[in-house]
Image: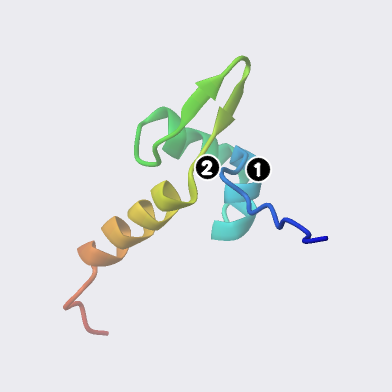
């Protein structure tokens, strides 16, 4: 019998905060301002992994070419 592996399809705001190393309040503010896309399902917000990647790419693109 083959065992199916279920991969995460989306994350909670708290999980994204943990991944990014941000506080929960900062992450919620990024979601509310639309900097990180999300969907609302009932009373909960969910964020696709691709949307976290988009945010990271957008933020790092702003500093590309910057030198210390």
Q: Which quarter of the figure is the C terminus placed in? A: bottom left
Residue highlighted by disc 1: 14
Q: Furthest residue to the front? A: 1
Q: Furthest residue to the left? A: 65
Q: Furthest residue to the top? A: 42
Residue depicted at x 61% and y 14%: 42
Q: Which mark is residue 42?
A: none
Above or below residue 61? Residue 50 is above
Q: Is residue 26 visible?
A: yes
In the rendering, at what x and y percent does residue 34 appear?
A: 35, 33
Question: Are circles 2 and 1 on residues that touch, CB within 8 Å?
Answer: yes
Residue highlighted by disc 2: 27
Residue depicted at x 35% and y 40%: 35
Q: Nearer the viewer, residue 61 or 41?
A: 41
| Precedes in sequence: disc 2 or disc 1 | 1
In the rendering, at what x and y percent does residue 25 appear?
A: 58, 37
Q: Is residue 62 left or right of residue 53?
A: left
Q: Is residue 21 visible?
A: no
Q: CA distance from mark 2 to mark 1?
A: 8 Å
Number of on-image labels = 2
Quadrant in the picture for residue 24: top right
Could you tell me which secondary element the residue under label 2 belongs to?
Answer: helix
Above or below residue 41? Residue 1 is below
Q: Furthest residue to the right? A: 1
Could you tell me which secondary element the residue under label 1 belongs to?
Answer: helix
In the rendering, at what x and y percent does residue 3 appear?
A: 78, 59
Label 1 CA crowd tier, 10 Å (few <14, some 14–19, many 20+)? some
Above or below residue 43? Residue 52 is below
Quadrant in the picture for residue 61: bottom left
In the rendering, at what x and y percent does residue 36 appear?
A: 40, 41
Residue depicted at x 41% and y 51%: 50
């Amino acid at each position: 019998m083959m065992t199916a592996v279920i991969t995460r399809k989306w994350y909670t705001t708290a999980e994204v905060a943990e991944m990014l190393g941000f506080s929960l309040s900062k992450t919620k503010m990024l979601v509310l301002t639309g900097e990180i896309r999300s969907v609302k399902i009932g009373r909960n917000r969910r964020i696709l992994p691709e949307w976290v990647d988009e945010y990271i790419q957008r933020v790092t693109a702003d500093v590309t070419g910057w030198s210390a």
